[in-house]
């Protein structure tokens, strides 16, 4: 305790009026001066411990943010069935035998959904795979009748693109900077149904109208570092989808939902353990959730805690993220190649061409 008090006093006294304690250059020079002061007062072992303590207080953090965006495809029917798509329809009124996963029903791929995925891939400067596979992703929810989701894990429709967006910087947010986020892949997949929780009656109701609706999942590389960058990227993607007509991208109706993967680490060190914040349906809430989660992880690590690889949700009323469940590993999904209608063959698409050749 005596050593801590003494070093704290000397540390404050050695701060020059023009040096911010979080500045890298100021911190390094300050620590060098203080190191000499410590060696002259204490033994080298005690001085080294105090020096390490000061460096830990001056530690800088870097945040890494990646996004998974689920956009509902603007189509009259679902991805693998002929059921209509209507947001305002009465519950369970747009459910086919295949949507309800009755035995003996088989998927029939919707051409419009494939075209929407290709158009979006070309707009984002992606490479379009001529052969695309569908897979079963197994997990058990009440609003997923089949017990698995048809998606694309091995060979999606489009890969290796980029999303260019602009973000405001500066103290007054008056300067625009152009940034680029890599697009890892674009894949087609089924949406799940909707669970409606009735707290008064302590029951959960299931609406399968949304089950089987076609989704575009756009996976962005972890090229962002804060909530404002992520919100700007989502707004830009929303405008692109609406301009193409591939999705209405109305976030209020759940037509555009975002999962954010967030981690922090010290510059020059390996990336930290990431958490995933699920189902964000507002660009403003996305920015708030990411910024809160970044600060939560920094506080946890600085206090000697550990970051868990978990799934969290954002409570917009409290303005914080709350844990939902442990993050499932790939082995838990038991990926399985879909043998029925499992591939699509396209023409040879060019990024500069308007049509297949």
Image: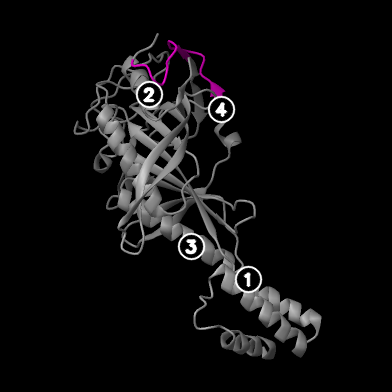
Residue at the image position 56 percent from the left and 23 percent from the top = 336
Task: Using the numbered discs, state the Cα–Cα distance from disc 3 to disc 4 in whole angstroms.
Answer: 33 Å
Image side of residue 45 versus residue 355, left or right: right
Q: Nearer the viewer, mark 2 or mark 4?
A: 2
Considering the whole magenta stretch, tell me its main secondary structure.
loop
Residue beneath label 4, please? Answer: 335
Indicate which disc residue 296 carries. Answer: 3
Quarter of the rendering occupied by the N terminus: bottom right
Q: Nearer the viewer, mark 3 or mark 4?
A: 3
Q: Mark 2 or mark 3: name the one nearer the start of the chain.
A: 2
Task: Using the numbered discs, state the Cα–Cα distance from disc 1 to disc 4 in whole angstroms.
Answer: 43 Å
Residue beneath label 1, please? Answer: 56
Q: Mark 1 or mark 4: name the one nearer the start of the chain.
A: 1
The image quadrant that residue 56 belongs to is: bottom right
Judged from the image, the secondary structure of the residue bearing numbered disc 4 is loop
Task: Using the numbered discs, state the Cα–Cα distance from disc 2 to disc 3 in whole angstroms.
Answer: 36 Å
Residue 38 in the image: x percent, y percent?
72, 85
- Vertical relation: 332 (above or below) 17: above
Question: Which colour style is shown?
Answer: one colour
Image side of residue 189 versus residue 304, left or right: left
Residue beneath label 2, please? Answer: 117
Magenta stretch, residue numbers:
336-354
Image side of residue 276 versus residue 282, left or right: right
Crowdedness of circle 3 by 10 Å Cα count: few (<14), some, many (20+)?
A: some
């Amino acid at each position: 305790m005596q050593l801590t008090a003494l070093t704290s006093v000397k540390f404050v006294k050695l701060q020059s009026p023009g040096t911010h304690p979080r500045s890298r250059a100021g911190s390094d020079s300050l620590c060098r001066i203080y190191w000499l002061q410590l060696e002259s007062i204490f033994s080298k072992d005690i001085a080294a411990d105090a020096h390490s303590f000061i460096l830990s207080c001056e530690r800088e953090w870097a945040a890494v943010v990646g996004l998974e965006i689920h956009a509902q495809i603007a189509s009259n029917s679902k991805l693998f069935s002929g059921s209509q798509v209507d947001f305002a329809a009465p519950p369970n009124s747009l459910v086919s035998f295949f949507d309800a996963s009755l035995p003996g029903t088989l998927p029939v791929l919707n051409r419009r959904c494939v075209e929407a995925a290709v158009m979006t891939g070309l707009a984002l400067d992606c490479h379009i795979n001529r052969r695309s596979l569908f897979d079963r992703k197994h997990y058990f929810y009440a609003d997923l009748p089949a017990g698995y989701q048809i998606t694309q894990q091995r060979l999606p429709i489009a890969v290796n693109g980029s999303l260019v967006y602009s973000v405001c910087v500066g103290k007054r947010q008056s300067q625009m900077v152009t940034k680029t986020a890599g697009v890892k892949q674009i894949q087609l997949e089924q949406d799940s149904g909707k669970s409606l929780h009735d707290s008064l009656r302590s029951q959960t109701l299931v609406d399968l109208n949304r089950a089987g609706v076609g989704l575009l999942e756009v996976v962005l590389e972890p090229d962002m570092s804060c909530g404002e960058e992520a919100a700007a990227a989502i707004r830009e993607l929303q405008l692109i989808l609406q301009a193409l007509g591939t999705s209405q991208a109305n976030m209020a109706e759940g037509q555009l939902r975002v999962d954010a993967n967030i981690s922090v680490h010290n510059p020059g060190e390996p990336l930290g353990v990431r958490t995933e914040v699920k189902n964000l349906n507002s660009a403003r809430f996305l920015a708030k959730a990411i910024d809160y989660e970044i600060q939560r992880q920094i506080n946890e690590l600085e206090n000697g805690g550990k970051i868990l690889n978990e799934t969290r949700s954002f409570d917009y009323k409290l303005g914080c993220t709350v844990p939902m469940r442990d993050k499932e590993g790939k082995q838990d999904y038991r990926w399985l190649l879909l043998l029925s209608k499992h591939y699509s063959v396209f023409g040879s698409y060019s990024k500069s061409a308007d049509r297949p050749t």
